Amino acid sequence: MKSASRPVRSKERFLVFGKPTIEEPEIAEVVDSLRKGWLGTGPKVARLERDFAAYKGAPQAVAVHSCTAALHLSLLAAGLQPGDEVITTPLTFCATVNAILHAGATPVLADVDRRTMNLDPARVEAALTPRTRALLPVHFAGRPCEMDALTDIARRKGLVLIEDCAHAIETEYHGQKAGRFGDFGCFSFYATKNMTTGEGGMVLTRDEEHAARLKVLALHGMSKDAWKRFSDEGYKHYQVVELGFKYNMMDLQAAIGLHQLPRLERWLARRESVWQAYDRAFAELPVELPAAPEPRTRHARHLYTLLVDEARAGLTRDGFLNAMTEQNIGVGVHYLAIPEHPYYRQRFGWRPEDFPHALEIGRRTVSLPLSAGLDDEDVADVIAAVESVLA
Ligand SMILES: Cc1ncc(COP(=O)(O)O)c(C=O)c1O
């Protein structure tokens, strides 16, 4: 490492990776919920569902507690049975694969395209078997997957298509919004995401029946609108109609999201300008920059991921991570490839080398801070830290 002895930032000003941007209106809205005493699922959740559906131009949106819950319930609502195979990417958060397992299905991995870091449709074709029932692409870092090819495979083979849009709230592909291609589109409002509710998630679906089923499954399998049973419309009995979960979103969470949603476009513009500043600053350094977005697409700029050229940098990826932390700049890794984790290796016998692109990316990648809340000084500090570590 070639960094100077004094870090770019002081310890007291450690730049937290993925820090959410919280402004006064959401604070006031949370306080309003606290004062009214309606904390659980209620009118604010219903409003967030309407507002999010309108933002995406979707007929139905169902709010849940997380994207993990959104994926799990979508897979159940799709009617998957034990032994059914779901093809997904090895370059994702463990939640994607865990949701498939919790739904009782079998995950099958197909490697990513080396440039886009998204599922490679040719690998998906090669992974199809008579047991394949669903495709679960992840729009990695906010870049849309090749949805023409993936929807074509799904249509030809009669597969359910579930999009993991955890990184892809603002993403578009050929004029259509991410989460609107599939039977289900699953979003995350976790604290680090492009908008947050603390923890939270949303499912988009075209189908009214699917939406109703998701709502029932999200609240213990209780009959529709059970959350209204404590309202002033007279006591309502509920009936448990199937085995469900406790995955409902709270009004306290929706209170935050209601005020984040209208700022998405402004925040995306800010992240685009940070992205361009990083691209300019790092062009000559021993790193590979994220590929430019494809024509007729909109990249949600959720993660700015560098690939460290260890030989040219004279530094390992983990050395880079540690050096940035010493500079008091928070960094992330998205992701160690799924087959690198012992649980999946032991359970499925997956070998990381069978997914060479995800393996290589996972071992070389570093994510830099990219929140809309970064000010110009923060961005300059990140750039100075990267330069001092790699120059
Ligand atoms: C690609 C991907 N899928 C799913 C999830 C799960 O989201 P949540 O934390 O809202 O359950 C995440 C969370 O980071 C993610 O990055």
Image (cartoon, grey):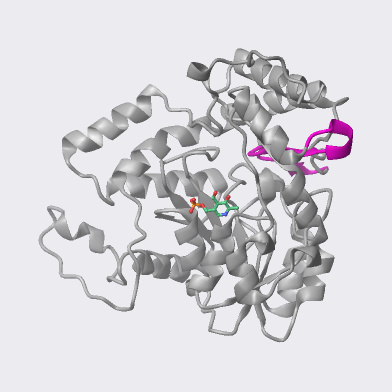
Closer to the camera, 118 or 158?
A: 118
Q: Residue at x 74, y 40 (%)?
A: 317
Quadrant of the image for the N terminus? top right
Examine the structure image and report whether residue 195 is included in the region drawn in magenta. Answer: no
Examine the structure image and report whether residue 299 is included in the region drawn in magenta. Answer: yes
Closer to the camera, 171 or 212?
A: 171
Closer to the camera, 328 or 41?
A: 328
The quadrant in which residue 32 appears is top left
Q: Residue at x 79, y 52 (%)?
A: 360
Q: Where is residue 382 in the image (x, y as percent from the top left)?
A: 67, 22
Q: Where is residue 293 in the image (x, y as percent from the top left)?
A: 79, 40
Q: Does residue 52 sit above or below 6 in this rendering?
A: below
Q: Position of 387 compared to 25: left or right?
A: right
Quadrant of the image for the C terminus? top right
Q: Does residue 80 sit above or below 59 in this rendering?
A: below
The quadrant in which residue 374 appears is top right
Q: Give the range drawn in magenta.
A: 295-315
The quadrant in which residue 266 appears is top right
Q: Residue at x 55, y 70 (%)?
A: 100
